[in-house]
């Protein structure tokens, strides 16, 4: 595959999974600048690991792995201000639709953001309907551990909403 | 908001995202064409740069010794030992660098490796500054260009000592702060695994 073909394929792949990356970014970043910055970091990491992706796992599983790894990694603070490319003008506006759900979606993200970064990853994957085995593969924990931890996070969220 | 309501809101968000463009294809192409690099590559490139610098110095100093710019074999030995030592130290740091694209251990395993590496890397700057500083002071003293030389060289020598002490002290404070952050991260990871 030529470099040009690889570029085209990558852009196509990112476009078809952009909502997944957006959901991760929104759970970890605060403000539009940080959001854009995290989005770029995820794209760079995806691009860097793309040649080594051999299709052993589902494409979405791999994208989740790279995205979550980038979002929770403390190495990310080294990358700030590396580029001023505005990836999209829509990022900020997605949650500001004037329909009845906007406030509730924001409230949901506010609750997710109160969790620690690893619990956040867990609940994002669960909300996105990934099965326990997929969650276990992405995070690198056992399947039974996933079930226990999800219950614990659910309880945490319940406590949050009651308080 | 209970967990069921959360799930409904998540589905509503998914519906909303289906009809929206969250990324501009042209911007991705521009980003890739700029060859922008993330934090991982920056650290690795910095270490590689250090390695090339050591090789360069390892070549320059024997030439200096051969041409008589370095007068004593023992001061030459000090500087060459320093360079070879730092070369292997940098090589070790570079080899210990976890491969960010290796996801076999999952996100949690990779984070653990990164935190462990960061702990090692945190000591890089203070170790480098202290070792280089001590070796240079020793080198100039052995070459007779330290306190025993003229006022001009004594001034430079004193300035160099002050610079090394200030840098090492700054490095220590920075390291202490960074280590606290890394330990906090490791604690969070351990808690997640233990719960």
Image (tube, rainbow, N blue to C red):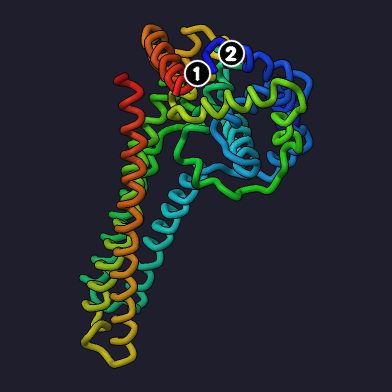
Answer left or right for A58 relative to B138.
right
Would residue B18 be visible to someone looking at this image? Answer: yes
Locate the C terminus of chain A by quadrant: top left
Please determine if labels 1 and 2 lie on a single subunit: no
Q: Nearer the viewer, residue A136 or A106?
A: A106
Residue B36 drawn at (x, y percent):
63, 44
Answer left or right for A44 relative to A70.
right
Residue assigned mark 1? A123
What residue appears at the point 41 percent right and 30 percent down from the top-left corner?
B111
Q: CA distance from mark 1 to mark 2?
A: 14 Å
Using the image, determine if residue A30 lies above or below residue B51: above
Residue assigned mark 2? B5
What residue appears at the point 33 percent right and 21 percent down from the top-left corner?
B193
Local SS, label 2: helix
- Dot 2 falls on which chain? B
Q: Nearer the viewer, residue B13 or B93?
A: B13
Q: Nearer the viewer, residue B130 or B19?
A: B19
**What mark, if any, has residue B2 been given in the picture?**
none
Would residue A7 be visible to someone looking at this image? Answer: no
Using the image, determine if residue A154 lies above or below residue B40: above
Residue B23 drawn at (x, y percent):
73, 31
Locate the N terminus of chain A by quadrant: top right
> Dot 2 surroundings within 10 Å: few (below 14), some, or many (20 or more)?
few
> Dot 1 surroundings within 10 Å: few (below 14), some, or many (20 or more)?
many
Q: Nearer the viewer, residue B27 or A25?
A: A25
Using the image, determine if residue A56 lies above or below residue B77: above
Residue A68 drawn at (x, y percent):
52, 27
Local SS, label 1: helix
Which quadrant holds residue A53? top right
What residue appears at the point 68 percent right and 16 percent down from the top-left corner?
B12
Answer left or right for A51 relative to B118.
right
């Amino acid at each position: 595959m030529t470099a040009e073909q690889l570029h085209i394929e990558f852009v196509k792949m990112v476009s078809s999974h952009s909502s997944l990356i957006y959901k991760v970014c929104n759970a970890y970043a605060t403000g539009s600048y940080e959001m854009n910055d995290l989005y770029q970091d995820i794209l760079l990491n995806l691009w860097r690991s793309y040649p080594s992706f051999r299709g052993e796992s589902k494409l979405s599983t791999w994208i989740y792995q790279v995205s979550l790894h980038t979002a929770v990694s403390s190495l990310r603070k080294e990358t700030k201000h590396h580029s001023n490319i505005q990836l999209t003008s829509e990022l900020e506006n997605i949650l500001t639709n004037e329909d009845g759900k906007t406030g509730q979606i924001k409230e949901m993200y506010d609750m997710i953001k109160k969790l620690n970064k690893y619990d956040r990853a867990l609940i994002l994957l669960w909300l996105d309907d990934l099965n326990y085995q997929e969650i276990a593969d992405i995070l690198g924990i056992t399947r039974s551990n996933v079930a226990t931890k999800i219950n614990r996070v659910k309880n945490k969220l319940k406590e949050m909403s009651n308080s | 908001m209970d967990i069921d309501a959360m799930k409904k809101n998540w589905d509503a968000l998914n519906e909303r995202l289906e009809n929206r463009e969250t990324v501009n294809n042209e911007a991705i192409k521009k980003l890739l064409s700029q060859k922008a690099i993330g934090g991982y590559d920056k650290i690795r490139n910095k270490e590689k740069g250090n390695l090339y610098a050591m090789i360069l110095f390892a070549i320059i100093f024997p030439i200096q010794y051969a041409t008589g710019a370095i007068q004593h074999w023992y001061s030459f030995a000090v500087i060459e030992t320093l360079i070879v030592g730092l070369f292997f130290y940098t090589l070790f740091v570079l080899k210990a660098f976890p491969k960010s694209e290796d996801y076999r251990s999952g996100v949690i395993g990779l984070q653990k490796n990164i935190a462990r590496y960061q702990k090692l890397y945190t000591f890089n700057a203070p170790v480098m500054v202290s070792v280089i500083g001590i070796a240079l002071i020793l080198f100039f003293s052995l070459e007779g260009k330290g306190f025993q030389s003229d006022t001009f060289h004594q001034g430079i020598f004193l300035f160099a000592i002050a610079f090394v002490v200030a840098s090492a002290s700054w490095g220590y404070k920075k390291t202490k702060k960074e280590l606290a952050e890394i330990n906090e991260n490791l604690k969070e990871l351990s808690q997640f695994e233990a719960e």
